[in-house]
Image (cartoon, helix red, strand yellow):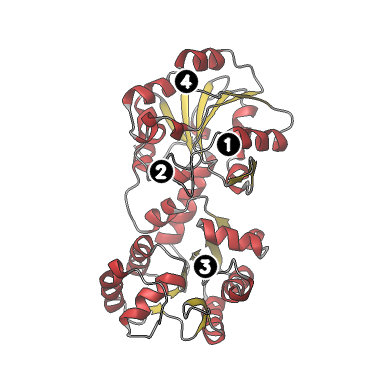
Amino acid sequence: MMKTIRDINLRNKTVLVRTGFDVPIENGKVQDNFRITAGLETVKYLLQNHCKIILAFHIGRKGDKENPALPVAPVVEELKRIMKDISFLEVSNWTGQTVKKMAQGLREGQILVLENLRLYPGEEKNDDHFARELASLAEVFVQDAFCVLHRDHASVTGVPKYLLTVAGFLVAREVEELDNAAERPAHPALAVIGGAKTETKIPVIANLLTRGYNQVLAGGVVANNFLKNQEVDLKNSTVDQEYLDDAAAIWDQFQGKIVLPSDYVWNEKEQIFDIGGETIRSYQDLINAAKTIIWNGPMGVFEEKKFEEGTLQIGQAIAVSSAKKIAGGGDTIAALRKFQLLEQMDFISTGGGVMLEFLAGKELPGLKILNK
């Protein structure tokens, strides 16, 4: 049974909170604060219990050109904007004694924010010394970053070796919502799976169908892999060649339960960029009949106006459905935001890859520790 912050006495304690504030930043400003606002319930609860709070999180990844590791300063500015009555102290560099002095000097109503964990090699290497240094700052560790529970990093599996560890509200709700959706869905249960990254989505399709989901509606590159095995002429469309055999095996195992597009919208380079009108209408009918819907991945290149219709129409159908509606993944959330549908989902996961691994039935190192 997972212990949460409600299960222990936290009053007046110094608490290290691992948050999931990995948000997009451009020109020094946070572009989407969804993950920040989703994690504030835990922070506010700790403040109400007169805790001294230390926040630790990452942004991007060191050496990644598309998603580089960046300083936390823009997130701190966003936190100051949202929580105007709280004093935020920022550690711009990691030197053990300096951080310890700041942690020891914290007063009630102050929050110390550590620099981006992934700027330090010890984080991703799960270095024991780095984990002990983090743990030495506090009396209790609260894990509230669902987005990293699939990582064997210092701030996920290292720190709990040295501190009493409990789940924050965000992690607890993520696990409850996704577990209920995967294990105890109301039927008909439907998954809408699109986008790219076929290697992470095929195991999800297989696991959900194995557990009794009635159908999976496929779109994007995921659909292309199944269509390729049906000898559909995809012309120049993207296909993950490496996973064609996996797609074929699942198709054979779950004959009739994986629903594929019947028509498409092409771009000028003869690539499928969206699902067509006939597919939209047939998918809408299945969505209207569903009692549980999991959505991860757009139907096409919704970022471009002329290829947004499939994702828009499917998103709207899900939004007005009376089913239990759960969505997740960076592109899915971006689409929901673009089409102003966020508020109409019952639950939106803050995890991208970790949501998929959870729904695929994989063991998550960070969750295993919380369940001990």
Q: Could you give the CA–CA distance between mark 3 and mark 2, rounded to whole angstroms? A: 24 Å
The C terminus lies in quadrant = top left
Total marks shown come to: 4
Examine the rendered structure and indicate whether residue 304 appears above or below residue 131.
below
Under mark 3, the amino acid is: Pro
Q: Could you give the CA–CA distance between mark 4 and mark 3, rounded to whole angstroms? A: 43 Å
Q: Secondary structure at mark 3?
A: loop
Dot label at residue 149: 2
Contact flag, marks 3 and 1 (Cβ < 8 Å): no
Question: Residue 208, how many percent across, how many down?
Answer: 37, 66
On the picture, is 247 further left or further right than 270?
left
Q: Could you give the CA–CA distance between mark 2 and mark 1, rounded to whole angstroms? A: 17 Å
Q: Please report whichever mark, 3 or 1, sits nearer to the chain's N-terminal start.
A: 1
- Residue appearing at x 31%, y 77% in the figure: 251
Q: Please report whichever mark, 4 or 3, sits nearer to the chain's N-terminal start.
A: 4
Examine the rendered structure and indicate whether residue 267 appears above or below residue 339.
below
Residue named by callout 4: 139
Q: Please report whichever mark, 2 or 4, sits nearer to the chain's N-terminal start.
A: 4
Question: Residue 237, how many percent across, how many down?
Answer: 42, 76
Q: Please report whichever mark, 3 or 2, sits nearer to the chain's N-terminal start.
A: 2
- When asked about the image quadrant of residue 105, the answer is top right
Residue named by callout 1: 42
On the picture, is 83 further left or further right than 116?
right
Residue named by callout 3: 298
